[in-house]
Image (cartoon, helix red, strand yellow):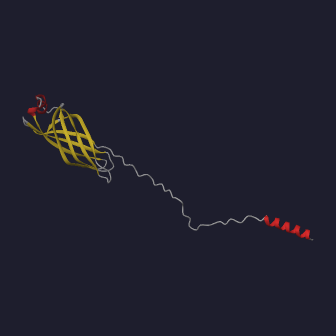
Amino acid sequence: MRNFLLFFLIIFILISCKSPPPAIEEHVIDNPVPVSTVVEEPPAPAIEIFEPVFEVISIVILQADLVVTKFATVLRVENPNVFAVNLSAITYELYGNGVFWANGAENNILHVPASSSNEVRFTFDMNFTSQNRRLLDDIIAMRQVNYRFKGQALVNLLIDGFPGFIADFDCTGLSDVRRN
């Protein structure tokens, strides 16, 4: 019987060694916290900024004398932007038939609404004593004159966070000479 008990004991030991693995406890988290959250924001809309377009509308004699003649130049400024701009300063030179006529500078020039245009008028004096006689004859006869109106304008953008800039302009063409 002793053998039988020994045999029974060995079988019992072998069965107890073959026990199943312990169960893995699953942990349930009530409020999970993400390790990191990546939120992609849409890119800010890009604002395209265009330089204003300058065009000479007319050159007019205001007062004609033999020595000094007073002229006026009307300049149209077109704003192609979706926001208003101000021209806060402008410097210019005016040439007629290839000859220097006048120059000047102005401040607080013009407000130009968005996608619109506006005009500004400059007056200046020209001394004919320093000019070619043919130019005086063209002016007196009120013939067309080749002009060149060039310069720089300080353009202020009327949107927050964007600085102003300098815009160069150089307008050429033919202008009628007319009395005001």
Q: Quadrant of the C terminus?
A: top left
Could you say which is closer to the camera, residue 135 or residue 153? Answer: 153
Q: Position of residue 72 (x, y in %)?
A: 15, 41
Residue furthest front as drawn: 2
Task: Write down the quadrant of residue 14 in the picture.
Answer: bottom right
Could you say which is closer to the camera, residue 7 or residue 61? Answer: 7
Left or right of residue 32, residue 167 in this image: left
Q: Position of residue 171 (x, y in %)?
A: 24, 37
Give the number of callouts. Answer: 0
Residue furthest top as drawn: 134
Residue furthest right as drawn: 1
Q: Quadrant of the N terminus?
A: bottom right
Task: Write down the quadrant of residue 172 in the picture.
Answer: top left
Q: Position of residue 19 (x, y in %)?
A: 77, 65
Q: Position of residue 43 (x, y in %)?
A: 43, 51
Q: Residue at x 19, y 38 (%)?
A: 93
**133 w.r.t. 19: above or below:** above
